[in-house]
Amino acid sequence: MTYSYFKGDNARSKARDGMAPNKRLTLAFVQEAGRILLGYKKRGFGCGRWNGFGGKVHDGETVHAGAVRELEEESALIAPKLDKVGVLMFEFLGDPQLMEVHVFTTKHYSGTPSESEEMRPKWYSLEEIPFKEMWPDDVYWFPLMLKGKHFYGYFTFKGMNDIVDYKLREVENIHDVPIPQGPQDTTCRG
Ligand SMILES: CNc1ncnc2c1ncn2[C@@H]1O[C@H](COP(=O)(O)OP(=O)(O)OP(=O)(O)O)[C@@H](O)[C@H]1O
C-alpha cells in the first residue's frame, strides 16, 4: 500500500493505491465594502479568465502559507490573515488527478494591487462580477462566499468549459470537511 502524505493544513491527504495525489491549489479573494479584487490571468492554467489569486502549494508549505505567498506574488498585496472559507474539488473527465482548491478571503491587507507577470488586478463592484469571463463554477459558489458562508463543492468538468455534474453545499466549519482523493463520480458517462 502506497501512501503519500502532505505536510500542514488540518487534514493529511493520502493517495489510494495507484492513484495520483490531488493537485493542491489556493485561491484568495480580497474584499472591501461593496467590491472585490479579481485578477485577469495572463498565462498558464485559466489564461484569459478573471479569478482570485492563487496557485500551487509548494512541498513543505502549509496551504495557508501558500495562499499568502501566491496572493503577494500575483497582486503585491500582503495579507497574512487569510480566512479559509471553502474547498472546491475539480474533476476533469479522463484525468485521474483531482484538483483540490482551498479558497480564502480577507478584508485586511496592506499594499496596493499591482500587475504581475501572471495577473492583472482590478476591483469589481459586487454587482458587476464578470462571471461570463470566469471559470464556469464560480457563478455557483461566489454567492456563498460573498455571504460569508463556508462551502464545499465538487465539480466535474468535460474540457475546460463544461460542467457535467456538480455538488455544492454550505458547511458549518470548512476545517472539518473531509477531502476526497481521486475521482468520486462512478456514473457511467458512455
Ligand atoms: C476549474 N475551475 C476553477 N475555478 C476557479 N479557480 C480555479 C479553477 N481551476 C483552477 N483555479 C485556480 O486557478 C489558479 C491556477 O493556478 P496556476 O497558475 O496553475 O498555479 P501557479 O501560479 O502555481 O502556476 P505556475 O507556477 O505559474 O505554473 C489557482 O489559483 C487555482 O486555485
Image (spheres, rainbow, N blue to C red):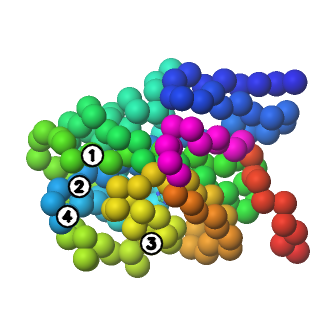
Pick the residue in front: 152 or 99: 152
| Number of residue marks | 4
Disc 4 marks a residue whose amino acid type is Arg
Q: Are marks 3 and 2 in contact (CB under 8 Å)?
A: no
Can the viewer see residue 157 in this picture?
no
Q: Earlier in the sequence, mark 3 or mark 2?
A: 2
Q: Are marks 3 and 4 in contact (CB under 8 Å)?
A: no
Q: Are marks 1 and 4 in contact (CB under 8 Å)?
A: no
Q: Earlier in the sequence, mark 3 or mark 1?
A: 1
Q: Which residues are magenta?
A: 171-181
Question: How packed is label 1: few (under 14 Cα within 10 Å), some, or many (20 or more)?
Answer: some
Q: Position of residue 73 (x, y in %)?
A: 29, 39
With 162 as the anchor, is 40 left or right in this view? left
Disc 1 marks a residue whose amino acid type is Thr
Q: Which mark is residue 31?
A: 2
Name the residue beneath numbered marker 3: 139
Marks 3 and 1, Cα distance to the nearest angstrom? 20 Å
Kindly identify the residue that appears in the image at 87 percent across and 69 percent down. Answer: 188
Name the residue beneath numbered marker 1: 106
Q: Are marks 1 and 2 in contact (CB under 8 Å)?
A: yes
Give the SS element for disc 4.
strand
Q: Earlier in the sequence, mark 1 or mark 2?
A: 2
Question: How packed is label 2: few (under 14 Cα within 10 Å), some, or many (20 or more)?
Answer: many
Marks 3 and 2, Cα distance to the nearest angstrom? 17 Å
